[in-house]
Image: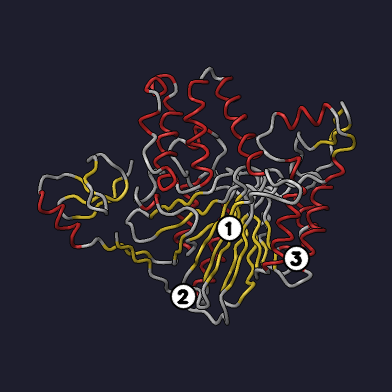
Amino acid sequence: MTVLIILGFSSVGAKDISIYVATDLHVMAPELIVNEGSSWEKYIDSSHKLEDYSVGLFQSMIDSIMTQRPDIVLIPGDITKDGEKVSHEYVTRELSRLTAVGIKVYVVPGNHDIGYIENALYFDGDRRYHAENITADDFEKLYASFGYKESIRDENSLSYAVEPVDGLVILGIDSHTRKISQNSLDWICEQAKNACQNNKQVIAMMHHPIMEHFNGQTDMKSDAIIKDDENIRSRMMEAGIHAVFTGHFHTTDVAMAYNENHTDSIYDITTGSKISYPMHHRWVTISENLGRIDINTFATNSIEGHPEIADVAKKRLEKCINAKLESKGASFLSSIACKATFLHCEGNENEANGVSLIDSIPFVAFVLYPEAWYAMNSMLDDFSFFGDDNQNRANDLNFSITLSEIEIEVPESIHDIAADKNDEQSYNLWGERINRNSHGIVIQGGNKMIKNP
């Protein structure tokens, strides 16, 4: 497949820009455990996250950033376990270590950061009691040095625009309620358009993904992506936003959507949580002329005192999957559901899979749990209805993109294969025959077509 993505920007940047991206930290301040006991043990026993290791994982991240010295750190929300004020205060103290050495840190809130959250708790032996949460105003004040003090602000939300490097504008988009109001969306698009008109490049970060990353994702988790996602994607593309770094779902995946006439595109680059398997973060390099973005992904396999942390995380996730399926009377799906989930969390499902696991999904699952069947198929095959079904099978972990206007060239050999058949069969961009009802980009009779579900 030949894909040309043409960039229409230039920059006065003097060097490559390095960006560390980590999301869903869910940091829990140590003082929230007043005394260990049954209340804390019961809580942790029901969680797939490593809240009990959150401080160690966070400190390991801070130490790694201090050693690697990126230019910028992006944290797209769910910074704290459940919005506890003491957890926010702990996080901001530690992030100040980074800004003190010249690293620019930018954050946006997630759904676990602001407002009353039931699981914001102190644990004291066999008792638990509520911890103080923070308001949106509190968040802005606490994180003033991490995006809010020296930026252009949206008066209707905690969104902002900042230019940390000449020619590069970062949009921090507030989606902590899973909504973006019309006024805020107008403001976001205005900031992007202004940047583009001034020959600047734009990237964005927000907590909630802007599209499904596998079919049936919102059936599995109703709040998996932003509300009004189709409109938000379309408006962002039109305004010149073509790469959005997201989190929330705790999986590492790249999805791509096109506009209706297939002249433009947007990437949703979602990164897994730092406290659930496989504890990923991204290392992003933007080229000197802002014309290329290289993205590499790394997993946390061990931290000081816990060399087995990755195994602990995987077993905890497996336990939660099994418990959920058992509660629905679907324990017979546990093995394949765990494989599908692990592969999707890890990224590069097809590449990691090697051989298809789809046939190993019991057919009875389709009869009894059709939504789960479709979701597992999509997860195992790394397929969704957005854009080109093969494009969505691109490397989720290590890849390069350029941004702005997109133009796709179909190799002549593919034209020839499809035209010679002259039987209205469908072919993908690899020249492989596919079901004529397939979605995404297909070749029929030598012509490129975009087929929507």
Q: Which residue is mark 3?
A: 98
- Quadrant for the N terminus, please: bottom left
Q: Amino acid at mark 2?
A: Phe
Q: Amino acid at mark 1?
A: Arg
Within 10 Å of disc 2 (Cα), the crowding (few <14, some 14-19, many 20+) is: some
Say if 273 sits above or below 324 in the image.
below
Q: Residue at x 41, y 38 (%)?
A: 378
- State which quarter of the image contains the C terminus: top left
Report which residue position mark 1 lands on. Answer: 282
Callout 1 environment at 10 Å: few (<14), some (14 to 19), or many (20+)? Answer: many
Instruction: Rate crowding at label 3 as few (under 14), some (14 to 19) or many (20 or more) other CA atoms within 10 Å.
Output: many
Q: Vertical placement of 446 versus 308: above or below?
A: below
> Which secondary structure lies at badge 2?
loop
- Residue plotted at (41% across, 44% down): 382
Residue 140 as seen in the image, left or right of residue 412:
right
Q: Secondary structure at mark 1?
A: strand
**Residue at (52% x, 74% y) in the render:** 200
